[in-house]
Amino acid sequence: MTIHSIIFYLLSSVVIVSTGIAVTRRDLVHAVVYLIFTFFGTAMIFYLLGAPLLAALEVIIYAGAIMVLFLFIIMMIRTEPSTAPLIPPGQWWPVIGFCLLYITAGFLFMYQEPDFWVFLTPAMATPGAFGRFLFQTHWLSIEIISLLLLIAVIGALVLGKPAGKKPNKTNGNRI
């Protein structure tokens, strides 16, 4: 096993553990902090696999902008962490059973598939080549995604508007 593989598995375990902790936290600020660890770990995996552009985008967009927005919203709402258990004591058995089944299936797949341990060589792609690839071959998908994001923004504005309030029409000036 090479140092590349060791770092990959170490980063993968950090991502899995921090994601699990983020999902199980009752305090939303702590959950967002663990989610930031997840995004940084994912960015390091992207960089390790030869995609520095994706790593930079992961850090700038997800770990930077979106998580700061989440923290800002959580601190504005000022929610208190719940004291109730996340999973009631009698319902742990299905969770444990699912985890064991998932781990067992993963090990079975690893040792049944003959080409599982064949490593690919990382391919470096420049941002220009990445952009040309996206917008020349997948332009329709990009346009559909941008339309979905526009619809999501409009939906968030409609849902966020207080019910029953009409815009103030005093003199038509907007400040």
Image: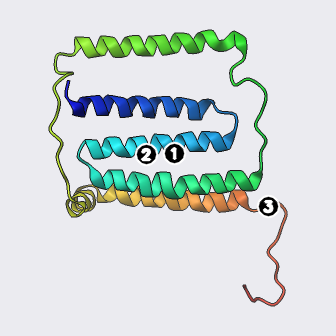
- Closer to us: 47 or 144: 47
Q: Looking at the image, tell me whether mark 2 or mark 3 is earlier in sequence order.
A: 2
**Which label sits on residue 40?**
2
Q: Please state, as top left, top right, bottom left or bottom right, where the C terminus lies in the image.
A: bottom right
Mark 2 Cα shell of 10 Å, populated few (<14), some (14-19), many (≥20): many
What residue is drawn where x is 69% and y is 25%? 86
The residue singled out by tag 1 in the image is 36
Q: Is residue 19 left or right of residue 160?
A: left
Q: Which type of secondary structure does the marked residue at label 2 adopt?
A: helix
The residue singled out by tag 3 in the image is 162
Callout 1–callout 2 Cβ contact below 8 Å: yes
Percent x, y for residue 119? 17, 30
Q: Which type of secondary structure does the marked residue at label 1 adopt?
A: helix
Looking at the rendered structure, the kind of residue marked 1 is Ile
What residue is drawn where x is 31% and y is 44%? 46
Residue 119 versus residue 71 in the image, above or below: above
Mark 1 Cα shell of 10 Å, populated few (<14), some (14-19), many (≥20): many
Q: Nearer the viewer, mark 2 or mark 3?
A: 2
What residue is drawn where x is 55% and y is 12%? 96
Q: Give the Cα distance between marks 1 and 3.
A: 31 Å
Q: Which type of secondary structure does the marked residue at label 3 adopt?
A: loop
Q: Please state, as top left, top right, bottom left or bottom right, where the N terminus lies in the image.
A: top left
